Amino acid sequence: MAEQEFGEAYPEAVAPNDAYPSRRGDPSKIVPYMSGDQNTISPIMSNPENVYQLGPNAYGKPATALNILRETVMGRELFDHAFKTYSKRWMFKHPTPEDFFRTMEEASAVDLDYYWRGWFYTTDYVDIGVKGLKKYQVANKPATGDLLSKVILVEEGSADYDPNLKGVSASETSKTLKEFMMDNMTASERAEVKDPKYFYEITYDKPGGIPMPLIVEYSFADGSTENIRYPAEIWRKNDQEVSVVLSTEKELTGVIVDPKAETADIDTTNNGWPRKEEKSDFDKMKEKIKG
């Protein structure tokens, strides 16, 4: 019998990456399990005999955790280096899960204690949302006992907020700042200065128990978007909510958390600003009947 090439004997083994028949690992696929009844969910590190849903618990959730760790938390290059180190260090031996956890941290120099704890030792889930947003404008206010003015930020809706100053930058409203630029900078230097015209304080909350990187897409009035990834360490000092300040030349029109569904967030209704009105099940049924 003539020898066959590996690809001929096992054609599925040479399928392109985008056609790999994987049923597990995609963050969105584990959401129904992690958002289910906590009475029937167990940590990954449980005796299999005590687990109600062994498939999602022993296969789906670990695959998802490692996928998110590589694609979102660590990055492919760092994850692959650490995983290669683990493979070499423990080949032909009998490693425990803890050996894997320690090696991944040692080889990458990344503190992942929070990640192992949340994904493997608890039944916590991921849920991050936009709690609120405050808009500020740059304004001039006379300093007490002084003829000079000082630059301040005025919150939208307050008594000092002036809608007519919409889009006015600090250099345009502050006489002292403008004079400083004129006296100390050349025309070409002044032309390169990008003075923010809008200031936003955005508060994000974390109803879920697992800390994850905060991935945000900002949309602006000119139709452009900007994606910013804040590391998971942003939750270190306050595990409930954090606030970030966005200074920009463009007016902000929208905020979306986890726009590409990378983190297995179980509730996306709180992921956006301005908040979109969700249709009730009754309204959805009516539309279905009419359609």
Image (cartoon, grey):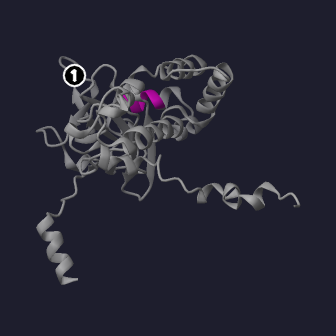
Instruction: Work out which residue is located at the far right of the displayed protein and give it.
Output: 2
User: Where is residue 143 drawn, in percent x and y?
Assistant: 22, 22
Q: Where does the image place residue 209, in percent across and percent down from the top left?
A: 27, 31
Give above or below for 48 relative to 239: below
> Which picture quadrant has residue 54?
top left
Q: Is residue 104 above or below residue 252?
A: above
Q: Position of residue 267 (x, y in %)?
A: 26, 47
User: Residue placed at 46% from the left, 22% from the top?
Assistant: 112
Tell me: 139 left or right of 78. Answer: left
Q: Locate the C terminus and report the quarter of the image it occupies.
A: bottom left
Res. 196 visible in picture = no
Taking the image as shown, residue 277 lies to the left or right of residue 76, namely left
Observer-nearest of 173 and 89: 89
**Residue at left 65%, top 28%?**
81
Q: Image quarter for residue 127? A: top left
Asked whether residue 83 is drawn in magenta, I would say no
* The magenta segment: 177-181
Return the x and y of residue 251 as percentages of the image width and height: 34, 50
**Main SS type for the magenta part?**
helix
Relative to 3, is 149 above or below? above
Q: Please state which amino acid type lies under the numbered disc 1.
A: Ala
Does residue 117 appear in the picture of this structure?
yes
Quadrant where the N terminus is found in the figure: bottom right
Q: Residue at x 63, y 34 (%)?
A: 77
Query: Can you identify the residue that label 1 sits on?
Result: 143
Left or right: where does residue 78 sit relative to residue 166?
A: right
Residue extending furthest toward the front: 1
Which residue is painted at 21% across and 38% down in the image? Answer: 38
Please tell me in which quadrant of the rendered image residue 248 appears. top left
